[in-house]
Amino acid sequence: MARKSHVQTTINGETVEFLCESRQSLLEVLRDELHLTGAKEGCNNGNCGACSVILDGRLVNSCLVLGVETEGKSVETIEGLAEPDKLHPIQDAFLENAALQCGICTPGFIMSAKALLDSNPNPTEHEIRYWLAGNLCRCTGYDKIVKAVLDVAKETSA
């Protein structure tokens, strides 16, 4: 039986403690231990972005981060964006622009867009496309997703 490590971290603003094996990815911990299933497993090798989360203000693929590496750090997931009675503006924009279909990639795109807008509140279309290049979508194409991010940027900078 593998030895488990005790980890204390902050997830979506709340202090969280969990036990995990040293080989478990943050994605596995989020989904299997903490039951936060918004981050999706698409490729499990860092190529698709479906598992994107924000770790200490930096966008990461949670499949490439070990759960034990989050000790003392702050993690933001898709579950932490919306308020109980109100979606986050990025989520609203995705809905308004029909920037989603099957939903597998959507949480990763939304977290990537949030990380971009946190660091650059008024990006150009080119900057958005470059930033989102690590996220793959097989259903919608990218134009509606880019439009949604542009709309949020225009809204928040107005």
Image (tube, grey):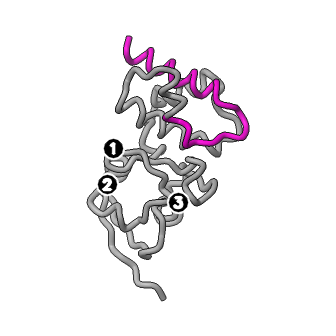
Residue at the (47%, 40%) spot, across then down: 111
Residue at the (51%, 59%) spot, across then down: 63
Circle 3 — which element?
helix
* Residue 151 part of the magenta segment: yes
Circle 1 — which element?
loop
Q: Earlier in the sequence, mark 1 or mark 2?
A: 2
Asked whether the beta carbons under mark 1 and mark 2 sit within 8 Å of each other, the answer is no
Across and down, in percent, residue 74 comes to: 31, 51
Q: Which mark is residue 57?
A: 1
Q: Which residue is mark 3?
A: 31
Residue at the (63%, 24%) spot, across then down: 144
Across and down, in percent, residue 21 comes to: 44, 76
Q: Which residue is mark 2?
A: 10
Res 59 quadrant in image: top left
Q: Earlier in the sequence, mark 1 or mark 3?
A: 3
Circle 2 — which element?
strand
Start-end of magenta stretch: 131-158
Image check: 77 left or right of 133? left
